[in-house]
Image (spheres, coloured by chain):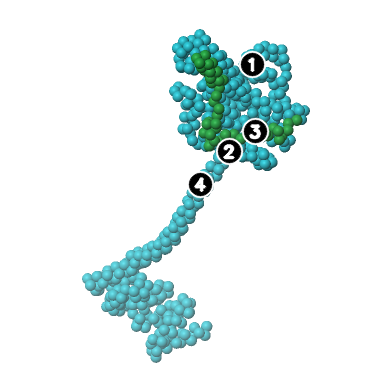
Chain colours: A green, B cyan
């Protein structure tokens, strides 16, 4: 049996055009590749030091 | 693939040949992201948009610079009605790759048509308003708002889902199932829509909804084929001549192969139906109106022509009456002319008078000829006294030859009287009296002739005239005795 209240919580307001810029800036664009690169650099720095 | 450190192209080695940095793990990450992208692409091709979004997001979590994945994700968002999210992805994509990027085309397309973007934004705002109504408990308002949203953008998946949920809440199972099915037409593997359909199926027992067949297709049979399908999530097979099957998680999706053909056939039928309806509308609605208009104009013309005809008829009647009047006048004039120049007319009388005058002037003794001419003059012309000069000439001539003429007539009359021809005697004596009213003997014998003929009244009239004109004379006394005699009779 579907619980309406619970189901309603799954719906979120859609982004409006006016909010697009803020959303763009808020977006976290860090990816696994960044983490890998960071880790590699850290390891490299440790070796050099 | 480029080195994350120096940007040079990487080779098959685990390190960058330019800067010497270890790229083994980086290569693994990029490779994994590509796998997710391929998976997302496969899902998008079979309209498993939800699955495609998950795979593409996963791809971008691994490698944010994957431009194709970002573009595809934007396209899918746009297809599902999430225009702003689509714009976000395309803008990021464009920033990552400035040239030869399809995102540029998408953005240009929207920017060149501001009305479209405004409409999409208005749709989103209405959806958000509907969601607010839901939170406030105004479900009826929310339903109305969502219907507006879907009339503006029928592919807005979230709006369809929310509307389906509201129908479920309102226990309008058929409508809820219909909305969920609409979602599944856009996003073939939308879990929320499938759950709603199941809910409807569970509650109604699958009474009479098309969702029943849909769910059957989704969840029944083909268990044997699932093994082969499970080997790869993106692997798909043609299981029969009529359907196409692919695996999505634990579910097997079957899609008819001739889906588009049926759509074409339906489109042709719809076009034919539209044309037929158009013809019928034209035949039953437009044509009668046209005919009515034409009839009205024809009636108007007829009325005008009728009015003109009435005017012409009135003119004709007037002219006819004038013609009749003129004809009468012409007849009168003709009669007058006839009286003037015709047989027995004035002109003839004048001519006879002139002839008599000429004869008198040439030979005054030719009494018979003069008399003959004068006798032909119509007495009415003389009596009418319309020609003064004519009368004067006539009486002047009569004064000259009248005494001789009366003698002639008197002699002729008396001759007939003695012969017992009283008829002729009366005619001649009357002329004698006419040309000389003083001829007493002619008068007296005229009375006698009447008496002899038995025409007593005329005889009495003549006798009384003699008594009146010549009282005391012998003829008057004799006339009196005849009068007495006739009176005694």
**Mark 1 burial class by Cα count in 10 Å: few <14, some 14-19, many 20+:** some
Q: Measuring 49% from the left and 83% from the top, which residue is drawn there?
A: B486
- In the image as oriented, which residue stretches furthest toward the front? A49
Instruction: Give me the chain letter of mark 4.
Output: B
Residue B161 lies in what quarter of the image? top right
Q: Are marks 1 and 2 in contact (CB under 8 Å)?
A: no
Q: Are marks 4 and 1 in contact (CB under 8 Å)?
A: no
Q: Who is closer to the viewer here, B370 or B193?
A: B193
Disc 3: which residue: A11
Callout 3: SS: loop
Q: Measuring 34% from the left and 83% from the top, which residue is drawn there?
A: B438
Instruction: Give me the chain letter of mark 1.
Output: B
Q: Measuring 50% from the left and 25% from the top, which residue is drawn there?
A: B93
What is the CA distance from the residue labelled 4 to the residue labelled 1? 76 Å
Disc 2: which residue: B125
Callout 2: SS: helix
Callout 4: SS: helix
Q: Are marks 2 and 4 on the same chain?
A: yes
Q: Nearer the viewer, mark 4 or mark 1?
A: 1
What is the CA distance from the residue labelled 3 to the residue labelled 1? 28 Å
What is the CA distance from the residue labelled 3 to the residue labelled 2? 14 Å
Disc 1: which residue: B233
Judged left or right of residue A1, residue B486 is left
Q: Are marks 3 and 1 on the same chain?
A: no
Closer to the chain start, of discs 2 and 4, is 2
Instruction: Give me the chain letter of mark 3.
Output: A
Q: Measuring 44% from the left and 23% from the top, which residue is drawn there?
A: B99
Q: Are marks 4 and 1 on the same chain?
A: yes
Disc 4: which residue: B298
What is the CA distance from the residue labelled 1 to the residue labelled 2? 37 Å
């Amino acid at each position: 049996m579907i619980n309406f209240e619970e189901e309603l919580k799954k719906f979120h307001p859609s982004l409006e055009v006016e909010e697009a810029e803020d959303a763009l800036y808020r977006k976290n664009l860090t990816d696994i590749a960044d983490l890998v690169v960071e880790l590699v650099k850290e390891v490299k720095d440790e070796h050099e030091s | 693939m480029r080195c994350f450190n120096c940007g040079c192209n990487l080779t098959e080695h685990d390190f960058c040949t330019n800067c010497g940095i270890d790229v083994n793990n980086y290569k693994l990450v990029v490779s994994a992201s590509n796998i997710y992208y391929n998976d997302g692409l496969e899902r998008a091709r079979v309209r498993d948009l939800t699955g495609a979004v998950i795979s593409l997001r996963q791809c971008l979590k691994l490698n944010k610079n994957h431009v194709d994945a970002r573009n595809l994700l934007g396209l899918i968002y746009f297809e599902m009605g999430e225009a702003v999210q689509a714009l976000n992805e395309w803008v990021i994509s464009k920033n990552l790759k400035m040239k030869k990027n399809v995102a540029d085309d998408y953005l240009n397309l929207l920017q060149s048509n501001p009305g479209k973007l405004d409409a999409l934004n208005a749709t989103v705002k209405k959806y958000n308003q509907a969601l607010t109504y839901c939170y406030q408990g105004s479900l009826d308002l929310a339903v109305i708002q969502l219907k507006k949203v879907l009339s503006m953008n029928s592919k807005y998946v979230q709006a369809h889902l929310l509307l389906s949920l509201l129908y479920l809440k309102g226990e309008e199972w058929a409508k809820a199932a219909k909305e969920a099915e609409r979602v599944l037409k856009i996003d073939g593997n939308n879990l929320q829509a499938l759950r709603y359909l199941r809910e409807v199926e569970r509650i109604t027992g699958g009474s009479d909804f098309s969702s029943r067949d849909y769910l059957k297709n989704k969840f029944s049979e083909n268990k044997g084929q699932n093994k082969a399908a499970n080997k790869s999530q993106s692997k798909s097979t043609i299981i029969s001549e009529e359907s196409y099957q692919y695996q999505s998680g634990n579910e097997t999706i079957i899609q008819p192969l001739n889906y588009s053909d049926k759509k074409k056939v339906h489109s042709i039928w719809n076009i034919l139906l539209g044309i037929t309806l158009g013809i019928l509308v034209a035949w039953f609605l437009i044509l009668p109106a046209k005919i009515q208009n034409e009839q009205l104009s024809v009636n108007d013309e007829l009325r005008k022509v009728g009015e003109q005809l009435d005017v012409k008829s009135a003119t004709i009647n007037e002219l006819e009456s004038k013609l009749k009047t003129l004809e009468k006048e012409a007849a009168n004039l003709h009669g007058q002319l006839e009286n003037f120049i015709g047989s027995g007319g004035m002109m003839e009388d004048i001519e006879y008078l002139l002839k008599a005058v000429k004869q008198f002037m040439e030979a005054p003794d030719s009494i018979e000829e003069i008399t003959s001419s004068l006798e032909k003059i119509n007495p009415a012309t003389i009596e009418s006294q319309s020609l003064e000069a004519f009368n004067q000439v006539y009486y002047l001539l009569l004064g000259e030859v009248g005494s001789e003429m009366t003698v002639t007539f008197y002699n002729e009359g008396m001759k007939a009287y003695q012969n017992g021809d009283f008829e002729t005697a009366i005619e001649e004596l009357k002329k004698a009296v006419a040309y000389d009213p003083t001829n007493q003997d002619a008068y007296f014998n005229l009375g006698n002739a009447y008496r002899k003929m038995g025409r007593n009244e005329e005889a009495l009239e003549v006798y009384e005239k003699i008594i009146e004109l010549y009282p005391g004379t012998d003829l008057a006394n004799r006339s009196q005795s005849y009068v007495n005699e006739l009176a005694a009779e």
